[in-house]
Image: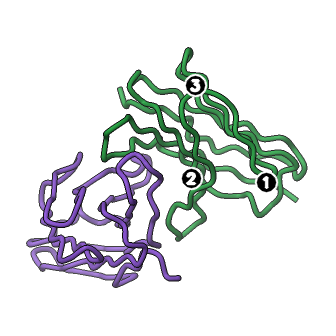
Chain colours: A purple, B green
Amino acid sequence: NAGVTQTPKFQVLKTGQSMTLQCAQDMNHNSMYWYRQDPGMGLRLIYYSASEGTTDKGEVPNGYNVSRLNKREFSLRLESAAPSQTSVYFCASTNQGNQPQHFGDGTRLSIL
Amino acid sequence: QKEVEQDPGPLSVPEGAIVSLNCTYSNSAFQYFMWYRQYSRKGPELLMYTYSSGNKEDGRFTAQVDKSSKYISLFIRDSQPSDSATYLCAASGAGSYQLTFGKGTKLSVIP
């Protein structure tokens, strides 16, 4: 049982390049989330999808776009990467909003 | 002020000690409370999940919620080196699609 799978695990980009982070869950969960985690800042919500066909902004959405491709997959796109977007990105999913979320192991993204 | 506050530590204890990790929150609408454990270079994994006030025990771990004082605690008995990780508290309100996380407390258990 894979749970939440994120690809790639590591990536280095140059400023201005674009990139899509992929996330897939095999738990038939309705809701999916993208977070970034930075030292001293904790987990911050970028975007979430409460159900297939819907997406909403979180705490730090600027510079990102998302696509809920189907019930399993939720992607995060950086259109023009900036050094401030260097971070560890986590995808999570849950069956119901206030229930515990299940996390992937993250994508470590460096932007030079 | 962040809605969930957590002392970042670091906290260092000898093996076998009882560990107490704490969070405070400000949103009275929070009803669901969670503790996650995060090992280095891994995603957070759920440790404990509680609804409203009270205690919940699972092996060496006890989660405690006091809604009157808006205080969340996690106790680890007989701590082991394998418990060395960052511990995150989280809370959510009824009908909410979002969890509010504390910033995490880094714990080291020294053999």
Give how far across and how far down residue A23 sits, in percent.
Answer: 31, 76
Q: Specify the amino acid type for callout 3.
A: Tyr
Q: Is residue A8 left or right of residue B14?
A: left
Give above or below for A109 relative to A2. Answer: above
**From the image, which quarter does the C terminus of chain A lie in?**
bottom left
- Which residue is nearer to you in this view: A14 or A49? A49
Q: Marks 3 and 1: in contact by CB < 8 Å?
A: no
**Label drawn at residue B71:** 3
Q: Residue at x 60, y 64 (%)?
A: B39
For the image, the number of numbered tags is: 3
Q: Which residue is mark 2?
A: B36
Q: Specify the amino acid type for callout 2.
A: Tyr
**Label drawn at residue B109:** 1
Q: Is residue B97 left or right of residue A19?
A: right
Viewer-side label of 1, 2: 2
- Give the Cα separation between the discs numbered 1 and 3: 24 Å
- Give the Cα separation between the discs numbered 2 and 3: 16 Å
Give how far across and how far down residue B54 sits, in percent.
Answer: 65, 29
